[in-house]
């Protein structure tokens, strides 16, 4: 069942149960709480089935990104998020256009894209040049697909690198990448991940990048050890331009089942409008777990 059908059937059932007259019916319908949130699914959720071209340029699988899109269209969502790892690292224009066309034919938006960059390197280094080339290539590729936002990393500094220096590198490199993205009409959303699970450090970087084409990717599952990760997430939610929701959360560094209703409340209360992207990373078979969580999320958003 598609998400639109899920919502429609749920709303109709609720109206039928509560209506006693025409006027009451109108009052019931007009009083339904509306939401500016929509639901998307990250391709990474099906990573065990997709070919990982980041690990091998010759990766093989009988389940390709096109199959992911077709499968996703049978679930109650409005969009998919694609991941560069599961496409050839130089994706032909014919393939790019084909994915865009297929998603449209399946009734899905491509809500965003994800890449695996590392911007902690010195801006003048050879490695940073490689990272920026990779990032630019995927900005162009995702722009060709009509993707509005790309999920990016700050990166993880090599052992022994001064942390303050790494932060300055990330800021300078992210500013440069954001300028490139703006030329293609794409927003970069930096994820709280690895080096930036420390929210103080994360926000220092975010606030240093003053651009309308840059914002936060709210990752509910990546927080440095703390007794109250939800409180930390409340700090970054108002800056979110993309939401990446996970079904587990670390409390004092130990992964536990996430309080999904609380996460959705944090997102709503922040004023965020847009896609909530489910990224499933747990051990249960995603073919079983993903539809269950999507149904739960639909009732909450």
Image (cartoon, rainbow, N blue to C red):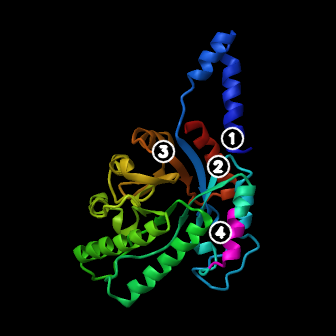
Contact flag, marks 1 and 2 (Cβ < 8 Å):
yes
Q: How many residues crowd mark 4 within 10 Å: few (<14), some (14–19), many (20+)?
A: few
Q: Position of residue 152 (x, y in %)?
A: 45, 67
Magenta-drawn segment: 91-100
Element type at mark 3: loop
- For label 3, the residue is 273
- For label 1, the residue is 4
- For label 2, the residue is 78
Query: Closer to the camera: disc 3 or disc 4?
Result: 3
Whichever of labels 1 and 3 marks the residue nearer the N terminus, that label is 1
Please name the residue shown 69% across and 9% down the image.
21
Q: Position of residue 280 (x, y in %)?
A: 58, 57
Q: From what the image shows, is residue 234 above or below residue 171?
A: above
Q: Nearer the viewer, residue 278 or 30?
A: 30
Separation of disc 1 and disc 2 at Cα?
8 Å
Whichever of labels 4 and 2 marks the residue nearer the N terminus, that label is 4
Separation of disc 4 and disc 1 at Cα?
28 Å
Q: Nearer the viewer, residue 196 or 39?
A: 39
Whichever of labels 4 and 1 marks the residue nearer the N terminus, that label is 1
């Amino acid at each position: 069942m598609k998400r639109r059908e899920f919502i429609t059937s749920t709303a109709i059932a609720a109206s039928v149960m509560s209506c006693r007259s025409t006027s009451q019916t109108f009052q019931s319908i007009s009083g339904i709480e509306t939401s500016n949130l929509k639901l998307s699914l990250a391709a990474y959720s099906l990573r065990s089935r997709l070919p990982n071209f980041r690990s091998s340029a010759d990766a093989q699988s009988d389940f390709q990104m096109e199959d992911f899109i077709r499968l996703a269209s049978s679930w109650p969502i409005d969009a998919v998020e694609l991941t560069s790892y599961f496409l050839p690292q130089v994706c032909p224009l014919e393939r790019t256009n084909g994915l865009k066309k297929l998603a449209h034919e399946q009734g899905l938006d491509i809500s965003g894209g994800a890449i695996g960059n590392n911007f902690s390197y010195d801006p003048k280094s050879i490695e940073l040049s490689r990272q920026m080339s990779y990032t630019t290539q995927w900005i162009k590729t995702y722009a060709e697909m009509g993707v509005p936002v790309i999920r990016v990393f700050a990166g993880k500094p090599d052992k022994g690198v001064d942390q303050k220096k790494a932060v300055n590198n990330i800021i300078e490199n992210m500013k440069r990448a954001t300028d490139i993205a703006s030329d293609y009409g794409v927003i970069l959303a930096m994820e709280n991940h690895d080096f930036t699970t420390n929210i103080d450090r994360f926000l220092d970087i975010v606030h240093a990048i003053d651009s309308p084409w840059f914002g936060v990717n709210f990752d509910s599952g990546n927080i440095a050890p703390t007794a109250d990760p939800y409180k930390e997430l409340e700090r970054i939610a108002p800056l979110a331009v993309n939401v990446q929701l996970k079904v587990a959360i670390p409390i004092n560094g130990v992964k536990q089942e996430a309080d999904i209703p609380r996460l959705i409340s944090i997102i709503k209360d922040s004023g965020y409008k847009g896609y909530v992207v489910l990224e499933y990373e747990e051990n249960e078979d995603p073919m079983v777990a993903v539809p269950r969580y999507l149904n739960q999320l639909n009732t909450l958003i």
